[in-house]
Amino acid sequence: MRKLVIIGAGSEIGKSLSSNGSKDVIKISRNDAIFYLYGQDLENYLTKLELTDSDIVYLSAVLYPKTIADQTQEEFYESFNVNFRLPTIIINYLNNHSENYNFCFVSTESALKGSFDDSYAGAKRAVEMIIEETRLNDPHSRIFAIAPSTIGDSGMTTSRSDKDRLASYLAAHPKQRFLSSHEVANLILSLLSDTYSYLTNTVVRLDGGKFARKTYK
């Protein structure tokens, strides 16, 4: 059975992915050792996961309700570590050591439009660029990202204090609703399937037409 490795399994998307019964699921939580290992120790950890013939979904993210200028050194490093360092290392490791894998990175609309937390938005955009430009050694492997807009039931959204701003976003949205975690998980599972074996080195933007500007009268 093909493995599904979920990094950030405690998120709502991760929980939805975990309920899929067609794959052997390995769940890696946000407090797992993988986030704190370096060099050979991290490579050994990834080797033990045996990622050939696996689907890997990277969900973990750090977003602070403060600007980059107001972040402490520890906060900035935590953002860099989770949002950029680890997914980049995993991409490079897979390309050099694994075959027949799919790697899906969950990015954000903020990677293009920006965010109050520029360290978060900048790191996500940097990983998108790495995904777009990394030429894979194995023709049977794929790397791609999805970049959803606001996910209504995600922890990042439900924990926000600016409810009025969220309400204004919702009222202005052409779909008149936010995404759901289950919806995003279903898209990820679909894109991981062999149906989309030609889809690689790309970012799928999932914003429901939020940024469309051209109108007809």
Image: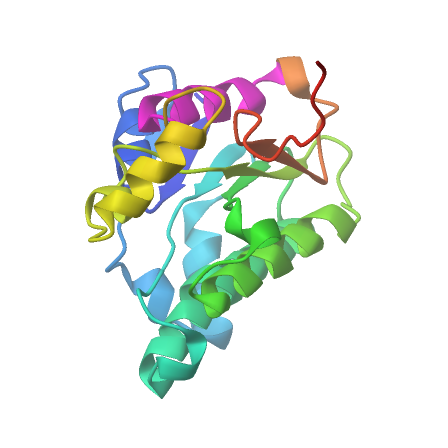
> Residue 175 occupies which quadrant of the picture?
top left
| 10 sits to left or right of 93 | left
Q: Is residue 46 visible?
A: yes
For the question of whether residue 28 can be seen, the reply is: no
As drawn, is 40 to the left or to the right of 61?
right
Q: Please provide percent x and percent y for residue 59.
A: 40, 45
Q: Is residue 191 magenta?
A: yes
Where does the image place residue 15, in percent across and percent down from the top left? 25, 31
Is residue 208 one of those drawn in magenta? no
Q: Quadrant of the N terminus?
A: top left
Question: What residue lies at 40% left-to-right and 77% top-to-bottom?
Answer: 76
Q: Whole-percent x and y of residue 67?
A: 40, 73
Give the extent of the magenta segment: 179-194
Residue 111 x %, y %: 57, 53
- Front one among 107 and 212: 212
Q: Residue at x 53, y 31 (%)?
A: 207
Q: Is residue 101 left or right of 18 when viewed as pictured? A: right
Residue 75 is drawn in which quadrant? bottom left
Residue at position x 61%, y 56% in the image: 125
With respect to residue 208, does 101 lie above or below? below
Predominant SS of the magenta segment: helix
Residue farthest along the front direction in this orientation: 217
In this orientation, which residue lies closer to the viewer: 74 or 150? 150
The residue under the point 57% across, 23% down is: 191
Against 162, is 181 above or below?
above
Please, which colouring scheme is shown?
rainbow
